[in-house]
Image: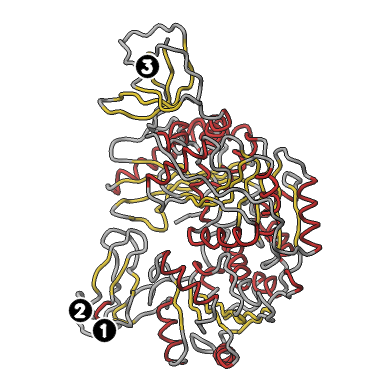
Amino acid sequence: MICEILLPKPIEKTFYYKTLKFLEPGIVVKVEFKNKKITGVVIKTHKEIIYKKPLKSIDSILCLTPLPNEILKSSEFVANYTCNFKSLILKLFLTGFERNTTIRLEKDLSNKPNKLKLSNEQRNAIKALKKLGNEFKVTLLFGVTGSGKTRVFMNLVKDKLLNGFQSLILVPEIILTKEWVKEIEEDFNISPTIYHSSINKKKREEICKAVFNNEINFIIGTRSALTLPFTNLGIIIIDEEHDNSYKQNSQLILNFRDFAIVRAKNSNCNIILSSATPSIETFFNVKIKKFEIVKLKNRVNKNILPAIKVLDSRKEKGIISKTLQKEIKNNISNKLQTLIFLNKRGYASFVICKKCGNTKTCDNCSSSLTLHEFAEKKKSYLLCHYCNHKEYFEDSCKICNSKNCFVFPGYGVEKIYEEVSNLFPDAKISLLSSDKVKNKVLSNEIKDIMENKVEIIIGTQIISKGHNFPFLKTVGILNIDSILNDFDFRSSEKAYQQITQVAGRAGRKDLHGEVFIQTYQPNHPVIKSSINSDYEGFVNYELIERKKSFLPPFSSFISIIINSTNEDKAKNYGLNLRNIVKEKFPNIVLFGPSPSIIFKQNRVFRYRILIKLKKNSKSNLIFKSFLTKITSPNGVKIYVDVDPINFT
């Protein structure tokens, strides 16, 4: 007998190997390929097949139980939709099949009642979700910040676990997994298993094998947890479903939120998308009745949403306005906390010579270097946020030979820390940014904030998601204008989401929280909608604007990114590809090839072709099939990004 085997290679074909017995589709095997032993998946077994060349035998069978048909179907669908190779999608599921492993099983699931009392609104939401049944359905759990969405869907998860099903909760950030586990263990008497890419390889393999053997039933993790080989899924939860962290923008470009919906469909199980600020695509799917919706309009314990006030930066001067300074001072006196939010890492976005105008740029990328640690002069350095190139900062210009000549426009959180430290020298201040703290340190910092050992918190988006700070009264949002005026057609959506998520950290306990937005555009529609906490009104306005311009969700975008270390090769192939596309698909709307926003990244030149398609058109399938067959010349790589959310 001969097996057709899919190998984890970027090629659209199967390979043939001899076998002594019939192997079911989905069996994971090890074979020799180009003098190396690699893992593959059986697609089909033939009793007889005519093959001219002599065939090698399968080296070993890694698991007698085949991968579920759901995984094979989901991988094929996602590969076709995203113009990827099915073999590379399947490869994501093979983590735990390299060796025999054992794992400490989860603690027994307790059947004790939940410790937390639920509000009437939460109980009604649980009833509404249970009424939707156990079969595949996508439901948006749309609740304001602090409305207790976790308690609602955890009741459903516990139900599934007690009935013998597996459950998966995805969160956008690694740091949130530990907080979730602690809360769930305390409130629901359940001990979930954590899974994310920072766990060591051996541990990941153990978890993978245990999930496959149905020995682990409850996983909380980041997007990589979706690639665990569940065999008995009962429910998937995507927390903060709008978050861009669910989109992988590396060589295998995938949106794991959408991948999760495909897995839920092929597993015939519920999937809940949870958010206070759902993506416009998700909200649109609710409006056209493709998704269900359950709402939580109120915060738990009858807490009210924080009042949002706008500070006009044309009138209130300074990085930290006088009004915000006064609030910080009052909070310190009353033993309450203030969060100052700015989504810019480092001290200054770039440095520029005041004598000749020279800026320090990255040798590898077409981007400015960001100044870090300027407060500690001996440690200050310049960092590229695209390739991580790092160099010591010298305050001297190589162009005009001037000394002590650099000025620092475009302030970041480290500059805010310096400013606040000068204004409040005796305050206990915590700076939370991915540059400053790693996960273990961040956990300790958050613990101190929870225990009210910190008076002023300064942070980037790392602090805006999912945290519950009981003593936080005031939030100050700085420089929201940089997002409002971004080149991205989603800039308004992203700005609204960021304002709402950060604002939602305030007033979580018995406090009447307040939020101050410093902006030069107080009359911007996003700012006005934020003041009224009217997300649905904002979405309806945004949908009207997007429909006028035929933008998603009324159309679909596909980006083709052309990369080469040789600029001419990238440009010429881009022009050639454009001509081929226009010849084969004369009615297609196509832009480019144009240099990407970050034209050079890590010594690679990048051109982009952007294609606009009608939504769900049959011609889309033909076009995507064409894209999978494109071959690029030596020295040129192409990547296809379906439904892009990043245009840099």
Looking at the image, residue 117 sits to the left or right of residue 211; the answer is right
Counting residues from the start of the chain, the first of labels 1 and 3 encountered is: 3
User: Looking at the image, is mark 2 or mark 1 nearer the viewer?
Assistant: 1
Give the percent coordinates (x, y) of residue 245: 51, 55
The crowding category of the residue bearing disc 2, from other C-alpha atoms within 10 Å (few below 14, some 14 to 19, many at least 20), is few
Residue 177 percent coordinates (x, y): 52, 58
Please tell me whether mark 1 or mark 3 is closer to you in this view.
Answer: 3
* Residue type, mark 3 in image: Tyr
Check disc 1: other Cα within 10 Å, few if <14, some if 14-19, many if 20+. some
> Tag 2: residue type?
Cys
Q: Mark 1 points at which residue?
A: 405
Element type where label 3 sits in the image? strand
Amino acid type of the residue tagged 1 in the rendering: Cys
Where residue 509 is drawn, which disc sits there? none
Cβ–Cβ under 8 Å for marks 2 and 1? yes
Residues at discs 2 and 3 in contact (Cβ within 8 Å): no
Is disc 2 placed on a helix, strand or loop? Answer: loop
Comparing labels 2 and 3, the label whose residue is closer to the camera: 3
Residue under numbered circle 3? 17
Instruction: Using the image, tell me which numbered label, if any, was put on residue 400.
Output: 2
